[in-house]
Image (cartoon, coloured by chain):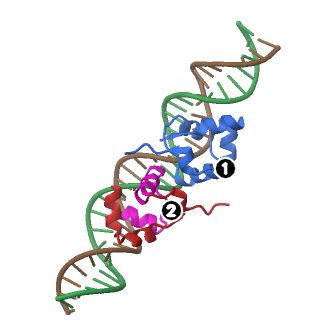
Chain colours: A blue, B red, C green, D brown
Amino acid sequence: MKNRLKVLRAERDWTQADLANKLDVSRQTINSIEKDKYDPSLPLAFKIARLFQQSIESIFLDNEA
Amino acid sequence: MKNRLKVLRAERDWTQADLANKLDVSRQTINSIEKDKYDPSLPLAFKIARLFQQSIESIFLDNEA
DNA sequence: GGCCAATGTCAAGCAATATTTACATAAAGA
DNA sequence: TCTTTATGTAAATATTGCTTGACATTGGCC
């Protein structure tokens, strides 16, 4: 599932490590999500949406049919 | 994480099995989510939101601080 | 060139999620 | 009462999400 994390970070000049700290996850987790290795859990997706004050749908893009 | 699946089903007069079929998961998966045994994956949450034509945030309720 | 910060990637392992199969319970109708 | 339908629950297994630790690559700056 595509996502806009990299852009959202860039807008705020945050590194992957910065974002990881704010979300209480590892840097590798952020990297893996950005690189589309896997999707975050629903609770983490909510946490991300809350941090950026945007809807989940505006950050994670649903491709499915 | 609380959710409104039971109500959304009721509004449409769908059984857990009906919803499970529409989402291509087992009936027990629906039951477990409704009974708050665990949260769905993000892709499944998107699929549910798409089916009910509502945002994820309007179906799954974020309790966290 | 050499240094440093940021990012990318890999492997091993644990925890959470999702699956199947199966059985129990509750409610409604004949 | 018997049957049927919907829901609840449990155990075993597979898969995914996330971790730590380590190392490679990239780009900017001195």
Residue identified by numbered label 2: B59
| Residue A51 numbered tag | 1
Badge 2 sits on which subunit? B
Residue B7 % position (x, y): 45, 71
Q: A65 or A21: which is nearer to us?
A: A65
The part of the image, by quadrant, that contains residue B50 is bottom left
The residue stretch that appears in magenta: B28-52
Residue type for callout 1 = Leu
Q: Which residue is painted at 68% across and 36% down in the image?
A: A11
Helix, strand or loop under label 2:
helix
State whether residue A7 is above or below residue A55: above
Residue B30 % position (x, y): 39, 64
Q: How many labels does the image show?
A: 2
Helix, strand or loop under label 1:
helix
Q: Which residue is painted at 53% across and 53% down in the image?
A: A42
Q: How crowded is mark 2: few (under 14 residues within 10 Å), some or many (20 or more)?
A: some
State whether residue A35 is above or below residue C22: above
Residue A47 % position (x, y): 62, 52
| Residue B34 numbered tag | none
Magenta segment includes B44: yes
